[in-house]
Image (cartoon, helix red, strand yellow):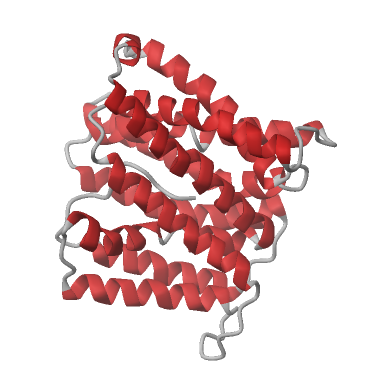
């Protein structure tokens, strides 16, 4: 198998797994509260990340992490997984998955806006057009196809879904200051975040659950949303001869996700969800013309 073929294999595997997580979120939230899902998924992800650290030979770097890097990882852990996933899971709890998933997919647009004041980057006219198209897609989804009326199906849920993109973008902007191997950094993010997540869980909902199905869902989310899939995507970008060849695969994820939401979760897909998603994808794609590839991450 050629190097590029291996890159495609890793990339397609990541996209296929990521396309399932919106359904996994929604099904898991039938049995768990958002903070409970975050706790159990984070523990599963921490174990996966630790296994990957050992397998990839990064244990010496982990043991010799400087205080500066430890502090940065602790702060970043408050953003991701603690705050980001708590807000995202709450959005999925309030909204149909077909609405929460495309809204969260606008993180790339949010990232480009925040990069202006925080990274001193400039917006091109093409970027402004892309932002306008994407946010029109948001309005189409949030208003169920009646953007001029501005009547939102669940305004709080929409606000949370969009807020999650803000948190995610801040995480990756501040993460540019990290000098650590990505897997080591993510492991430390989760290690520092889990005690805080556990405290919040204990003080609010508690750790009990009514059905083992919720725990199965949390394990799936921890393995394939927060853990293994990130490494698959990172390997794809490292192996490819052209980042654009692999990066463009990510646009398949939200489309596949809508089909799975229909057939697995059982939601009837509203035309506005599909139309809004296409506008968001078009905006994201337009924004990437003539620019470096996005960070090696996706959103559900």
Is residue 253 depicted above or below 114 in this figure? above
Decide which of 175, 136 is in the foreground and name it. Answer: 175
Left or right: 72, with 95 as reference point = left
Instruction: Kindly indicate the quadrant of the structure image that contains residue 128.
Output: bottom left
Instruction: Kindly indicate the quadrant of the structure image that contains residue 241.
Output: top left
Split into 4 quadrants, where in the image is the N terminus? Answer: top left
Q: Residue 72 in the image: x percent, y percent?
A: 33, 33
Report whether residue 181 is seen. no
Report whether residue 285 is seen. yes
Q: Residue at x 76, y 48 (%)?
A: 30
Q: Residue at x 70, y 31 (%)?
A: 216
Decide which of 55, 191 is in the foreground and name it. Answer: 191
Left or right: 256, with 123 as reference point = right
Q: Residue 279 in the image: x percent, y percent?
A: 41, 72
Decide which of 67, 214 is in the foreground and name it. Answer: 67
Left or right: 206, with 226 as reference point = right
Is residue 89 depicted above or below 146 in this figure? above
């Amino acid at each position: 198998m050629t190097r590029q073929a291996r890159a495609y294999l890793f990339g397609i595997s990541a996209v296929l797994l990521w396309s399932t997580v919106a359904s996994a979120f929604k099904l898991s939230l039938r049995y768990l509260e958002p903070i409970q899902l975050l706790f159990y998924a984070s523990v599963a992800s921490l174990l996966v990340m630790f296994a990957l650290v050992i397998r990839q030979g990064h244990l010496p770097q982990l043991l010799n992490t400087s205080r500066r890097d430890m502090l940065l990882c602790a702060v970043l852990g408050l953003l991701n997984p603690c705050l980001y996933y708590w807000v995202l899971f709450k959005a999925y709890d309030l909204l149909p998955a077909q609405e929460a998933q495309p809204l969260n997919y606008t993180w790339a647009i949010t990232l480009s806006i925040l990069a202006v004041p925080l990274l001193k980057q400039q917006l091109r006219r093409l970027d402004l057009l892309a932002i306008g198209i994407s946010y029109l897609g948001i309005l189409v989804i949030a208003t169920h196809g009646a953007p001029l009326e501005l009547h939102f199906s669940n305004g709080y849920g929409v606000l949370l879904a969009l807020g999650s993109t803000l948190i995610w973008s801040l995480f990756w902007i501040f993460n540019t200051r990290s000098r650590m191997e990505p897997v080591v950094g993510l492991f430390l993010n989760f290690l520092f975040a889990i005690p805080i997540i556990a405290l919040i869980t204990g003080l609010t909902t508690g750790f009990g659950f009514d059905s083992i199905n919720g725990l199965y869902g949390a394990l799936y989310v921890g393995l394939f949303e927060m853990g293994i899939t990130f490494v698959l995507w990172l390997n794809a970008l490292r192996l490819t001869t052209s980042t654009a060849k692999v990066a463009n695969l990510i646009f398949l994820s939200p489309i596949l996700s809508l089909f799975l939401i229909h057939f697995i979760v059982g939601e009837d897909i509203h035309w506005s969800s599909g139309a809004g998603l296409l506008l968001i994808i078009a905006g994201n794609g337009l924004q990437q013309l003539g620019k470096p590839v996005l960070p090696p991450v996706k959103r559900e």
